[in-house]
């Protein structure tokens, strides 16, 4: 019986110690959350109204892409083969882009990473978009201020003819009319 009492006492002491540590972790998390809330970070992509920076690059098919020669509107998608959310969002982007009013010519998909790792993404995107594969800090990523993946933006020409961001976080959902 004394062994049972010792074991129960030991388990109780371990539970109390675990509770103290858990409360300490929760306190630290609250402190970090408050610190992060006060820090103003750089945006992870250009914001609505910002002009798309200049770029001069080419697609995987060898077609040149130059900002000043693009019509509008343009749907831009940025993906990285090393990012799990990108793998999840890629099929939705492909389906969304497939129904883009301007067709394939109005969609530019950029895969950021080395060519070998990007090949699968590029193959999936190829039928619905003009595909660019570039390293981190490449021409398109820099022009659109991309710092996080996946990112999907829409840009159009404004009254002055500048290519500006009109949606900095495109929801990949198309509303369909109900017929009945």
Image: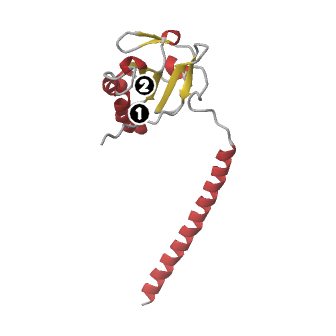
Return the x and y of residue 157 as percentages of the image width and height.
Answer: 54, 17
**Residue at x-position 51% and y-position 17%:** 139
Quadrant into which the C terminus falls = top left
Q: Earlier in the sequence, mark 2 or mark 1?
A: 1
Circle number at residue 167? none
Frontmost residue, 174 versus 79 = 174
**Residue at x-position 35% and y-position 28%:** 99
Q: Relative to 107, does residue 34 appear above or below in the rendering?
A: below
- Residue named by callout 2: 113
Examine the image and state in which quarter residue 123 appears: top left
How would you rate the neighbour count of disc 1 (Cα within 10 Å): few for under 14, some for 14-19, many for 20 or more? few
C-alpha separation, residue under disc 2 versus residue under disc 1: 8 Å
Frontmost residue, 40 versus 98 = 98
Examine the image and state in which quarter residue 115 appears: top left
Q: Relative to 175, does residue 7 appear above or below in the rendering?
A: below
How would you rate the neighbour count of disc 2 (Cα within 10 Å): few for under 14, some for 14-19, many for 20 or more? some
Q: Residue furthest right?
A: 38
Whether pointer 2 and pointer 1 mark residues with C-beta atoms closer than 8 Å, the reply is yes
Kindly state the secondary structure of the residue where label 2 is placed.
loop
Kindly state the secondary structure of the residue where label 1 is placed.
loop
Q: Residue furthest front?
A: 180
Examine the image and state in which quarter residue 47 appears: top right
Return the x and y of residue 52 as percentages of the image width and height.
Answer: 56, 19
Instruction: Please say whether residue 137 is visible from this viewpoint.
Output: no
107 sits to left or right of 9:
left
44 sits to left or right of 65:
right
- Residue named by callout 1: 82
């Amino acid at each position: 019986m004394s062994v049972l009492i010792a074991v129960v006492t030991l388990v109780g002491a371990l539970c109390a110690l675990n509770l103290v540590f858990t409360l300490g972790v929760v306190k630290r998390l609250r402190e970090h959350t408050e610190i992060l809330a006060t820090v103003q970070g750089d945006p992870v992509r250009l914001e609505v109204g910002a002009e798309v920076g200049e770029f001069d690059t080419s697609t995987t098919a060898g077609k040149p892409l130059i900002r000043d020669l693009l019509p509008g509107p343009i749907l831009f998608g940025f993906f990285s083969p090393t990012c799990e959310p990108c793998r999840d969002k890629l099929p939705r982007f492909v389906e969304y882009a497939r129904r883009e009013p301007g067709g394939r010519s109005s969609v530019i998909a950029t895969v950021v990473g080395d060519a070998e790792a990007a090949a699968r993404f590029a193959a999936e995107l190829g039928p619905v978009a003009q595909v660019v594969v570039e390293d981190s800090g490449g021409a398109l990523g820099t022009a659109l201020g991309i710092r996080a993946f996946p990112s999907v933006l829409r840009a159009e020409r404004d009254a002055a003819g500048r290519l500006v961001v009109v949606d900095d976080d495109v929801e990949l959902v198309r509303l369909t009319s109900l017929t009945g």
